[in-house]
Image (tube, helix red, strand yellow):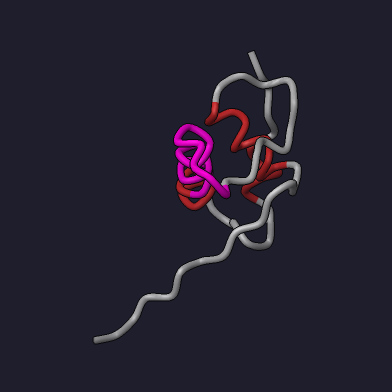
Amino acid sequence: MAFLNIEKGVNREDVKSRFKLSLVASQRARELYENKEGTVPPQVEGYYKNVTIALAEIIENKITFEEEQEQDE
């Protein structure tokens, strides 16, 4: 079983909440699962499940993300 320091992920400057951490991790896990062309391969080793890989990447600052801006109509 993987033991990840979730608080380290929550304390990132661009995350700041457990909800956002879970949202970003789920989006990254979906990218890894779908494995489409152009998807960045896993940036950490030693984990087998996509969600765990995604969380480890975020906690270890191996990936970055940008928020989409909402457009007013």
Q: Which residues are magenta?
A: 24-38
Q: Quadrant of the N terminus?
A: top right
Q: Is residue 34 magenta?
A: yes
Give the residue at x 54% y 53%: 17
Q: Quadrant of residue 55?
A: top right
Residue sticking out furthest to the front: 37
Residue sticking out furthest to the left: 73
Is 23 displayed left or right of 59 in the figure?
left
Q: Quadrant of residue 64?
A: bottom right
Give the residue at x 34% y 81%: 71
Picture coordinates of residue 69 (x, y %)? Answer: 43, 75
Is 16 displayed left or right of 44 in the figure?
left
Give the residue at x 66% y 35%: 42
Out of 5 and 68, give the one closest to the viewer: 68
Q: Is residue 66 magenta?
A: no
Q: Quadrant of residue 45?
A: top right
Picture coordinates of residue 65 (x, y %)? Answer: 60, 59
